[in-house]
Amino acid sequence: MAYILQVDFPMDGPFGDEMVDAFRELAKSINEEEGLLWKIWTENPESKEAGGIYLFASKQTAQNYLKMHMSRLNDYGIEPVHAKLFEVNEALSKINNGPIK
C-alpha cells in the first residue's frame, strides 16, 4: 500500500524560477530517499507558504522521511511545519488517473 505525505510550512521565498534555481540540487537528492515514488512541490507566494505532496511505497519510509525532513526544516528555523500522512486508496485513485504504479 502506498502512502501520501503532505507537508507545508511558512516560507518567505524564493518562489517560481528562483525556487527552481535555489532548490534544484535538493530536489535531485530527494529522489534518493528510500521508498520515495514521487514528489510534487507546492508554493503559494501570496500566503508565503511552501511544501510538497509525496508518494511513498510504505508507511515506514514516509515516517522516516518526515522525521528527517522536520529536523532539516527546524534546523533552518522553519516553524511551524504541518504534516499529514494518508493511506492511498489505489483502486479509486486509478479511476481518476492518479499517478499510482
Image: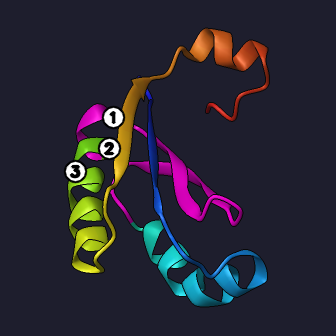
Q: Count every numbered label the image shows and give the total.
A: 3
Q: Nearer the viewer, residue 45 or 38?
A: 45
Q: Work out whether mark 3 precedes mark 1 in sequence or the reverse, and give the earlier one.
A: 1
Is disc 3 surrounded by few (<14), some (14 to 19) or many (20+) residues within 10 Å?
few
Q: Quadrant of the C terminus?
A: top right
Give amino acid for label 2. Answer: Ala
Identified at 54% across, 53% down, the residue is: 52
Seen in the picture, residue 96 relative to 38 is either above or below; the reply is above
Identified at 24% across, 43% down, the residue is: 63
Q: Say whether residue 92 is left or right of residue 7.
A: right
Seen in the picture, residue 99 relative to 53 is either above or below; the reply is above
Kindly identify which residue carries mark 2. 62
Kindly identify which residue carries mark 1. 58
Residue 41 badge:
none
Give amino acid for label 1. Answer: Ser
Badges 2 and 1: C-beta atoms under 8 Å apart?
A: yes
Task: Pick out the residue farthest to the front.
Answer: 47
Identified at 62% across, 10% down, the residue is: 91
Q: Nearer the viewer, residue 56 or 15?
A: 15
Callout 2: helix, strand or loop? helix
Q: Nearer the viewer, mark 2 or mark 1?
A: 2
